[in-house]
Amino acid sequence: MLRGARIAGVVGAATAATAVTLLTGSGAAAPAARVSVAPAADTYVTATRKKQNFGAARTLVAGPGSRARAFMRFDLRRQDAKVVRATLRVYAQRASKAAVTVGTVADSLWTERSVSYAQQPKASGRVAVLRKLRRGWNSVDVTKATRGRYLVSLALGAAKSRVAVSSRESGAHGPRLVLQTTPVATAPMVAAGDIAGCDTTGDEATAALVDTMPGTVAALGDLVYEDATASDFATCYAPSWGHFKARTRPAAGNHEYNSPGAAPYYAYFGAAAGDPAKGYYSYDAGSWHVVVLNSNCGVGGCDDNSPQVSWLRADLAAHPRFCTLAYWHHPRFSSGQIGSDAMTDGFWDALYAARADLVVVAHDHDYERFAPQRPKGQADPKLGLREFVVGTGGRSHFVMGTPIANSEVRNDTTFGVLRLTLHAARYDWQFVPVAGATFTDSGSGLCH
C-alpha cells in the first residue's frame, strides 16, 4: 500500500514543546513538604575490635582520629525533589563536650553487616561540626553532603573522647535526615526505532500513540526505509512521525547511511541531529543528562580510543548528573535476529565508569528489556546499565532467538513505543502497544 494512497491527517498535530509535571514523592502536583528520612544503614567501627561488625548494634560510637567512627547511609532517590537544606539529627545517650565531626563517604553502596574496622568505607571531606552533644536530640546542618547526591553517606568522628548516639536499631531515637526540598520537573520521553516505510502502516499506528504522549521523542535510528533519501523522508516519514519533528532528538541508524554521509537525515533534522561530521551530541532532560551516540562506527569510532568515546568521557565528566541516559541504534546486547554487537563496548565502558543508568537502542525489530549489567554482560544490580531494545517503531518484525543472559522480557510481534518518565533520581518505563495489541511491559528503577 503506497503512502500517497493513505488518508491524510492520521496523526494529529503534536505540541512542539516538551511538557513537564512537577511531582512530589507521592505523585501529587504540589510542592514537596518537609521530610524526615531514616537511614537505610548505619554501623560503627572501632580499633579495639578490628574484625567485629556492629551493624546490629543499638548504639553508634565515634572517637578521636580514626580509632572509632560511625557511619550512616541515607537513600533519597524516592523523594522526587531537590534538597534545599538537610539537617542531621542524632540522639545522644549522654552529654559530651567533645566536638563531633561529620564527613562524607564516597562509597554509597556499603552494607552495615559487611563493615568492620579492617574493612570500612573511606571518609573524605568534613561537611559539619557539632560543637558539643547534649543529652537527647542534637541537630547539625549537612546540606553540603547532599548537593548533587541522592545516596548520602556520612561518617561521624569525635575530637577528644568517645561519644555515643542511638542507631536506627534503637527505634524512635534512631538518626534522621530532615530535608527541606523543592519540586523537580519530571521529564517524559518516548522512544522507538526502525520506524517508517511507504510499504507499511505500522509507523502510522505508533505515531498515533506518540500523538497522545508529551515529551522528547527519542528516534533510535533507521527512521525511514529503505535508503533514507530526501524523498523517503518527505513521502514516508513526514506524514507520520514527521508530526513530532520539532520535539525529536534522533540517533542515526545504518539505513540513514545508505545515503552518502546520511546527508538527507542531517538536512531533515538540522541542528537537532548534531554535527553531520559526527552524529553524536548530548542534552539535558529535567535533572537527567542524555547522550546520543552514533553506532555507525566508521564515522566517529566506537572503541575506547576513538574520537567519539573520548568525547563521551569528556561530556560525562562535564555533566556529572546523578542520572544519565544514553541511546543509539545498534544494541550491545540482544536476543533478536541480528543479535548483540560488541562494537559498542567502548560506549558501555565509558558509561559504566561514569555510573550511567539507562541505554536505549533498536536495530533488531523487537522489544527486549535487560536487567542491569556490566559492559561484558555480567549481572550487576547495584551499578549496571539497564538496556532496552525498542525496534518496534512500525517497519516490520524480526523473529527472536534463544534469550541471552540477563534478558528479562521479550516480544517480537507487537509494534509500540517505550514511554519513559525521568524523575529526579529514578525512572519509570512502560511499553505501550499500538491499538488492538495487548503486550505491554512496565516497571521502575533507581539511579545510582
Image (cartoon, rainbow, N blue to C red):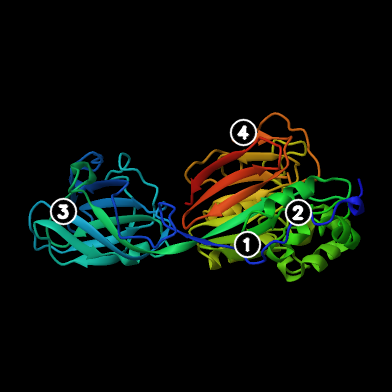
The image position of residue 240, as x and y in percent, is: 79, 55
Q: Is residue 330 above or below residue 438?
A: below
Is 188 situated left or right of 111 in this image? right
Residue matched to label 1: 312
Q: In which image quadrant can residue 269 be found?
A: bottom right
Q: In which image quadrant can residue 436 be found?
A: top right
Residue matched to label 4: 405
The image position of residue 71, as x and y in percent, is: 27, 51
Pointers 1 and 4 in contact (C-beta within 8 Å):
no
Pointers 3 and 1 in contact (C-beta within 8 Å):
no
Q: Earlier in the sequence, mark 1 or mark 4?
A: 1
Residue matched to label 3: 91
> Which one is nearer the viewer's eye here, 421 or 299?
421
Judge depth for marks 4 and 3 and give the one in front: 3
Circle 4 crowding by C-alpha within 10 Å: few under 14, some 14–19, many from 20: some
Q: Amino acid at mark 4?
A: Ala
Tell me how far mark 3 sits from mark 2, CA to CA. Answer: 56 Å
- For residue 348, the mark is none
Residue matched to label 2: 221
Q: What residue is rendered at 68% in x and 53% in y?
A: 210
Would residue 375 be visible to someone looking at this image? Answer: no
Tell me how far mark 4 sits from mark 3, CA to CA. Answer: 47 Å
Q: Amino acid at mark 2?
A: Gly
Q: Earlier in the sequence, mark 4 or mark 2?
A: 2
Is 442 situated left or right of 52 in this image? right
